[in-house]
Image (cartoon, rainbow, N blue to C red):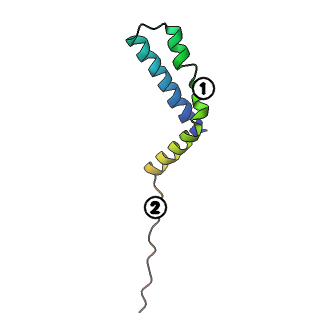
Amino acid sequence: MAIWGVNYGLIGLGAMSLYFVLRINTDWNPLWIFCGTVLPAPLASILFARHAKSMFLALDHFFDPHLRTQKKEKKAD
């Protein structure tokens, strides 16, 4: 479930950020900006779910790497 949360969070944050940037910097109709940025967000989340999983696993490995330790060899006396 965390993968889907990251996915929807990033897509939603990106869509809303793009909406407000376009709303402030352009004279376009707000309805057209909304239709172009916020409405495609659920579809984009479904399409990028696979990439969200790989990104989540990559971040997990980056912050908590599972390194193998070298086994100490026994010395023959």
Does residue 41 sit above or below 70 in this rendering?
A: above
Judging by the rendered image, the residue that carries numbered circle 1 is: 42
Q: Type of residue at label 1?
A: Pro
What's the residue type where badge 2 is placed?
Leu
Q: Is residue 9 above or below residue 66?
A: above
Mark found first going from the N terminus, 2 or 1: 1
Q: What element carries label 1?
A: helix
Quick one: quadrant of the N terminus? top right
- The number of callouts visible is 2
Q: Residue 67 carries which label?
A: 2
Spatial separation of the CA atoms under disc 2 and disc 1: 37 Å
Query: Residue at the location (55% across, 15% down)?
Result: 35
Give the camera-side residue of 41 and 27. 27
Residue 44: image x %, image y %?
57, 29
| Residue 37 horizontal/vertical position (percent) | 52, 19
Query: Outermost residue toward the left?
Result: 25
Front-most of 69 and 52?
Answer: 52
Q: Is residue 34 above or below residue 12?
A: above
Residue plotted at (49% across, 6% down): 29
In the rendered structure, the answer to whether residue 26 lies left or right of residue 54 reads left
